[in-house]
Image (cartoon, rainbow, N blue to C red):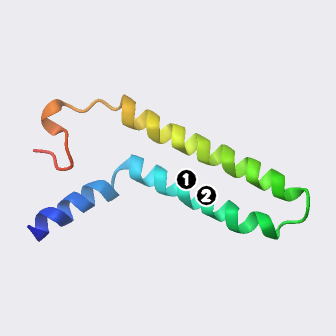
Amino acid sequence: MLFDLTKRLGVILSSVVTLVTALAVAVNEFVAQVAPELPSGWQDNAVRVGVAVVTVLGSAAAAIRRLTEVPSEERGILPK
């Protein structure tokens, strides 16, 4: 049972969608921490760039998830 759980966790962690989503969260958190420390006027630019990067990464994750064809016998967390 534990081996099955570790295999499932490995599949989830190696997914491109998971990695892109994690990168989007990291960028969002980085901008949230750095923007208040920037000089006045630069804060808006940092937030704008951060939002653009997160939007692109989120769109990429959605596109990969929707457009990647997976045969019905391989759907699910662990392929058959």
In the picture, measured across the screen, residue 18 lies left or right of residue 40, that is left
Using the image, tell me which numbered label, if any, was put on residue 59.
Answer: none
* Residue 68 figure quarter: top left
Residue in view at x 75 percent, y 53 percent:
47
Horizontal and vertical percent for residue 76?
19, 44
Q: Mark 1: which secondary structure?
A: helix
* Residue 42 figure quarter: bottom right
Image quarter where the N terminus lies is bottom left
Horizontal and vertical percent for residue 72?
16, 31
Image quarter where the C terminus lies is top left
Residue in view at x 50 percent, y 39 percent:
60
The vertical placement of 75 against 12, above or below, is above
**Three-letter residue code for mark 1:** Ala
Horizontal and vertical percent for residue 56?
59, 40
**Three-letter residue code for mark 2:** Val
Tell me if mark 2 has few (under 14), some (14-19) or many (20+) residues whose alpha carbon lies within 10 angstroms of its own. Answer: some
In the picture, measured across the screen, residue 36 lies left or right of residue 1, that is right
Q: Mark 2: which secondary structure?
A: helix
Tag count in the figure? 2
Tell whether label 2 touches label 1 (CB within 8 Å).
Answer: yes
Tell me if mark 1 has few (under 14), some (14-19) or many (20+) residues whose alpha carbon lies within 10 angstroms of its own. Answer: many
In the picture, measured across the screen, residue 12 lies left or right of residue 7, that is right
Q: Which residue is mark 2?
A: 27
Q: Residue furthest right?
A: 40
Residue in view at x 12 percent, y 35 percent:
73
The vertical placement of 19 against 59, above or below, is below
Distance in Å between CA atoms under marks 1 and 2: 5 Å
Q: Which residue is mark 1?
A: 24
